[in-house]
Image (tube, helix red, strand yellow):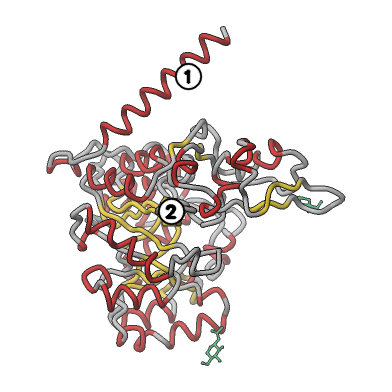
């Protein structure tokens, strides 16, 4: 029985690998006209909404059609249920109608670009700790929790080569910091996600991601992740890293209009504006200044200057784009200032909050007094679209946004 099971597993692994290869390369021009599936979640959320015209409108769209939309940015793929930045996660995002798919870009020891949310998250997003020969290469090898002290570990893409990276399996992002064994530490998927699809997610290099998304006829949003090692890294400069990411699209003959490069570091954005203007004019400045009140005020005040320096798109966490006035959700000062400076806005990240019955924490911090059920997320999305006028939104579960986008005709 065990043998049968093992060979069935091997077989399915082999055929999965064949599918991976077959998916690469160019599909027909009709590749965007796939049979988009939104699944049951949007219906659950719509039923959960408070009564009103928005709920009635969304109910009226229940039978589709649902279409691929560039409003829908797949945040790390579809990590509400699939291991982030894996072939399986990107495939799920595509099936759910995402028009733009994200790869967070980090570099390996041999200076190759791969898709990972952070340079040093391999211990929470992959099975590296279960592979002793690679775990030994981690910046901080695993030290179990003991005597009330949490476990310590740090494994970076720059600790291993691209070939070693490709030998890992993607898992759901999470860890039990109180784990006293590797197995206990790795068993930390947040309660509102699932391990159902976390058997062995196929990790992706940046080049593989480009070929995959290009073959689907979709668009790209690569994020140059802020290095967690001192730069230059063995002679590799920040500028070369920023340039290498763009070079990959040029090498694949991708039109810059299909690429939205992102970074939290203003210097990267200005580098692209100056040195790669066709890509730079679509660069997305990820704005985390809003995380403090003073930073929020500074960011709001800085919009005219950012516009003058050529920044065309800003992207804060979506909490910063709305607030509550007279019991209603309305655009924030930040959102109004960006619009006035003619800067477009992309928001992040929808469907990362789990249940909203207690106000929704980080992503709903400015509107928590009026948030008390999961359906309220559509009320917030509606204000972001109809009043703030966002260009797109990153989401951990593309279907939730695709349902809204198709209902309101957002291409
Ligand atoms: C870890 O232990 C600390 C201290 O006992 C506790 O506060 C915390 O909730 C625990 N975390 C997890 C993820 O179990
Ligand atoms: C806000 O701007 C002021 C004035 O330029 C500066 O001194 C301060 O450090 C900034 N604060 C933050 C959090 O960015």
For the residues bearing labels 2 and 1, Cβ distance under 8 angstroms: no
- Residue 76, image x, y percentages: 43, 51
**Mark 2 — residue?**
51
Mark 2 or 1: in front is 1
Give the camera-side residue of 242 and 327.
242
User: What is the secondary structure assignment of the residue under circle 1?
Assistant: helix
Real-space Cα distance between discs 2 and 1? 48 Å
**Mark 1 — residue?**
9
User: What is the secondary structure assignment of the residue under circle 2?
Assistant: loop
Q: Is residue 347 above or below residue 395?
A: below
Q: Residue at x 20, y 47 (%)?
A: 217
Q: Is residue 340 left or right of residue 363?
A: left
Mark 2 crowd level (few <14, some 14–19, many ≥20, 10 Å Cα) = few
| Residue 56 appears in the picture as rendered | no
| Residue 349 appears in the picture as rendered | yes
Q: Is residue 112 above or below residue 170?
A: below
Task: Determine which quarter of the picture holds residue 182.
Answer: top right
Give the camera-side residue of 15 and 359.
15
Residue reaching furthest to the top: 1
Q: Residue at x 25, y 57 (%)?
A: 249
């Amino acid at each position: 029985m065990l043998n049968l099971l093992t060979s069935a597993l091997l077989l399915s692994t082999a055929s999965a690998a064949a599918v991976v290869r077959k998916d690469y390369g160019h599909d027909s021009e009709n590749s965007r006209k796939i049979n988009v599936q939104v699944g049951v979640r949007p219906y659950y959320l719509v039923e959960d909404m408070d009564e009103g015209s928005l709920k009635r409108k969304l109910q009226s769209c229940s039978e589709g059609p649902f279409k691929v939309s560039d409003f829908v940015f797949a945040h790390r793929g579809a990590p509400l249920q699939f291991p982030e930045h894996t072939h399986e996660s990107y495939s799920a995002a595509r099936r759910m109608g995402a028009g733009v798919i994200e790869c967070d870009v980090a570099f390996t020891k041999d200076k190759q670009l791969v898709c990972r949310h952070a340079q040093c998250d391999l211990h929470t997003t992959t099975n590296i700790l279960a592979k002793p020969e690679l775990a030994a290469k981690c910046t901080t090898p695993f030290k179990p929790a003991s005597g009330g002290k949490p476990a310590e570990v740090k494994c970076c893409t720059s600790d291993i080569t691209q070939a070693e990276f490709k030998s890992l399996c993607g898992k759901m992002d999470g860890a039990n910091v109180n784990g006293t064994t590797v197995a206990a530490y790795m068993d930390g998927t947040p309660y509102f996600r699932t391990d159902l699809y976390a058997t062995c997610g196929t990790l992706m290099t940046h080049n593989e991601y480009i070929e995959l998304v290009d073959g689907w006829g979709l668009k790209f949003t690569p994020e140059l992740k802020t290095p967690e090692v001192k730069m230059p890294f063995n002679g590799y400069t920040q500028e070369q890293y920023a340039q290498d990411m763009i070079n990959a699209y040029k090498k694949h003959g991708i039109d810059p209009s299909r690429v939205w490069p992102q970074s939290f570091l203003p210097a990267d954005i200005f580098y692209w504006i100056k040195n790669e203007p066709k890509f730079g004019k679509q660069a997305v400045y990820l704005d985390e200044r809003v995380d403090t009140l003073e930073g929020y005020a500074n960011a709001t005040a800085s919009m005219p200057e950012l516009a003058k320096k050529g920044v065309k798109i800003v992207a804060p966490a979506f909490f910063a784009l709305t607030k509550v006035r007279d019991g209603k959700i309305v655009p924030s000062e930040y959102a109004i200032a960006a619009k006035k400076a003619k800067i477009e806005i992309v928001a992040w990240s929808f469907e990362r909050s789990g249940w909203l019955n207690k106000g929704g924490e980080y992503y709903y911090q400015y509107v928590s007094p009026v948030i008390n059920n999961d359906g309220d997320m559509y009320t917030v999305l509606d204000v972001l679209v109809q009043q703030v006028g966002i260009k797109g939104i990153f989401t951990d579960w593309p279907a939730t946004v695709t349902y809204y986008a198709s209902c309101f005709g957002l291409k």
